[in-house]
Every structure is written in structure tokens, then in C-alpha cells.
Image: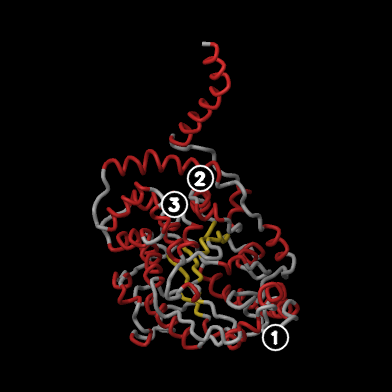
Amino acid sequence: MKMGKKLWQIFGPLVVAAVAIVILFLLPSNYHQASKTTIDKAASSLSANVLKGDGLKDQAFKSGKFVPFIGSSELSRMDPFHPSVLAEKYHRGYQPFLLGAPGTQSLTHYFSLQAMAGVQHKKAVVIISPQWFVPRGTRPNMFGFYYSPLQAVNFLETAKDTTMDRYAARRLLQMPSGKSDGIVHASLLQVAAGLPLTSFQKFYLKDIKGNALNTQDDLFSRWFIRDRRQQIQNGLERLPSDYSFSELDDLAGELGKGETTSNDFQIKNSFYNHQLKNLQGKLKDSQTHFNYEFGPEYSDFQLLLSQFAKDKMDVLFVIPPVNQRWADYTGLPEQTLQAFDRKITYQLRSQGFNHIKDMTDDGSEDYFMQDTIHLGWRGWLEMDKSVQPFLTTLKAKNVSYQINNHFYTKRWQETHANDVPDLRGTSDQNDDQE
């Protein structure tokens, strides 16, 4: 008896604590809202836990102030002309909420978007990287890094027997992440087959898995958020008080010139010296075989478009160029970029997505790109010529899209750009104005 009492004194508190933690994670979460400081920090953090979570994003977008800026690694290139800096400096009335990081592509953004609250009937800006559209599509390891079980549960709880949901379930099943939980895996198989979830699957997803994940999101998504606000502040201090495009463009050229002195490609010194200098000789003519014309990314991108239509969101799509000086050096075929541009523009315009800022042909402009593929200095400023008027009124106008499920097919993924109409520059709307 004494031994049992002694063991309880040693292990009892651990057992009680473990039970308490289990109960905490299984009960519905109802924690206080994040502070304004936390939301502001999250908006420019590009931290994985922010992208994978829901609570911070939902609170931000419900406020009406924040606009989703969806992209990948280019969003981290924070020079003084970055959208977050310009919006704050010139009191635009909106604040970009940056959603993306190196390796994020359409599939990650779809699962994030479909779980968001507060974005319905709102606007968004999407930067479409040609480099997403490689033949193999998104890399499973990168998708897995940003995979959110919480967003997968939300998808399963709301999934219907539609082409969009069946395709999304099949794509998640093709990733190792989709097999990480046995019941989630079985539920995905149900959705992919067009079948309803079982009663047990619904109970597990909502009352066990969902409650636990929501509690974790509420407890932990606010920790370890990267703070980029000092970078924004540094940018603010370098800009003139009043907005003048010509003055800003001159300044962007001066800054770009001063920060690209180590090479002939107009690539930022820090990037060139750390990433390219020692490899340059090996990279000459290394991209002659690159192709962005085919692959599953075109159908993954269609998931995003279908979700925008479902949420009745008004979206500005930005198609950036590549650094033409570097492309000439690596032998990246111009036809590769033009084929991608034609095909993705057709996918957009044929379904009614007509706000497009196409900068494909601007890659040779001076100090337009910060490195080999990412906008910087004058490139950000050129993009802002479309962003600012588009977001003058944050509430979306009545949008009308004609979603075409053909874009989910293997046939579309393998279609040659020359086999579709060239709709570049043929919108009824002025792409640079609302």
C-alpha cells in the first residue's frame, strides 16, 4: 500500500497533467483574439505556422483592412518598393497579408484559401511564378513542409461531390502528407470517389481531430512568428513623403544600380555573392531544356481559380518576368516563357479572370529584378501601378466567372500553348485600372 502511494506521489501528477492536456486539446477552442501587434507582425512574417494556421488569418481578413497577397519566395524580397512598404508609406487604406514562401505553389495555396474566413466578396493579389509550372508539378517534400492537417480537415468537412473536390482529394492522396493519418486518408479516398463520409469519419474529423488542431492553432500559431517590421521601417525611411511615380522610379534605379555592382546581370550583390558567384561557370547554358508549358500545376492552379469563384473574390493576377540577362546566360528559351504566358492567360481570361498585370516582356528593363527570377526595385514599382488602383476600393465588385472543369484534365495539362487562342492583351477591361 505504501509502495502504491509512493508511486502515485511520483507519477500521479504526470498522469493528471497528461489527462488535462488531452482534455484541453479535445475541447473546442475559445481563446482570446490576437493583439493588433501580433496580427501586424503576422501579416509580413511569411512564417510557416501563419500560413498553415487559420486563426490569425481569419481575424485579419475579417477586419476588412488586410488583403491577401499570394505568391512564393518573391514576397520575401523586401526592398523599399515592396507592396507592404508602399501601402504603409502612402496610407493606401489596405495592408498586404503576405501568404507564401519558397516552395509554396498552387496546391498549398488552395488548401489555405479554402479554409479562410473573411475573404468572401473581397479582393486579392496573386503573383504567378512561371517556375511553378515545371513538368513534375509541386514537389511532395515542399508541399509536406507547408501541409496543414487543420486545413485538410476543413476541406474534408466541407467537401462535396464536385469535380473540384474530387480533384483536390486525389492530389492530396498523391502526396505523402495525405497518408499521415489513417482516418484522414480513408476520408480522402471517399471524397475522391465521390462518396459521402461515414458517420464515424465526420465525428472524428470534427470532434476529435478538428478540436485538437484548432486548439493547437490557437495556442501555438502566435509563437515564433518572424518579425519583418524593421525591414519595412527601413524601407519607409528611404522613400519620399509624397507619392510620385517618376521620382520613385528614379530612386529605384539609383538604389538598384548601387546594390548590383558585383556582376553584369543586375543581380543584388548579396544574392550574387552568396548564391551564384562560385557556381556561375557551371550554370552557363544550364537551362536550355527548361519547360513551363505542361504538367499538373495547371490543374492545381485551377483549384485556386475555382475557389476564388466560389468565394466571389475579385483578383489581380501578376505574371512577373525573369531576369533576361541571366536567362540569356543560362540559355532559358524565350519560347518557354511565351508559351507559359499564352497558356496561363488563356486559362484566366476564358473563365472571366481579366485583371492581369503581365510583365513577361519586361525582364530586360534596368533594375527590374532583384535576382534571377524575383521582382525588385523598379519591378515592384511597375507592379504597384496596377495594385494601387485595383485596391482603391477593397470590396469586390460583382464578379462573373465561367468555371470550366476541362482545366482539371490531363488533356489540358498536356495541351500546347499554340493550340489555344492567344488572349494576351484582349480583355474588355483596362488591366491597370479598377
Q: Residue at left 39%, top 67%?
A: 300
Q: Which residue is mark 1?
A: 264
Camera-side residue of 418 and 187: 187
- From the viewer's side, name the closer residue of 398 and 209: 209
Which dot, 1 or 3, sits closer to the camera?
Answer: 1
- How was this image coloured? secondary structure
Residue 392 visible here: no
Quadrant in the rendering for residue 418: bottom left
Q: CA–CA distance between discs 1 and 3?
A: 46 Å
Which mark sits nearer the N-terminus, 2 or 1? 2
Residue nearest the observer in this picture, 272 or 118: 272
Would you call the spot at circle 1 few (<14 residues within 10 Å), some (14-19), or many (20 or more)?
few
Whether tag 1 and tag 3 are in contact, CB under 8 A, the answer is: no
Q: Where does label 3 land, which residue?
A: 117
Label 2 amino acid?
Asp
Which residue is labeled 2 in the image? 217
Q: Look at label 1 and name its amino acid.
A: Asp
Q: Position of residue 157 (x, y in %)?
A: 34, 48
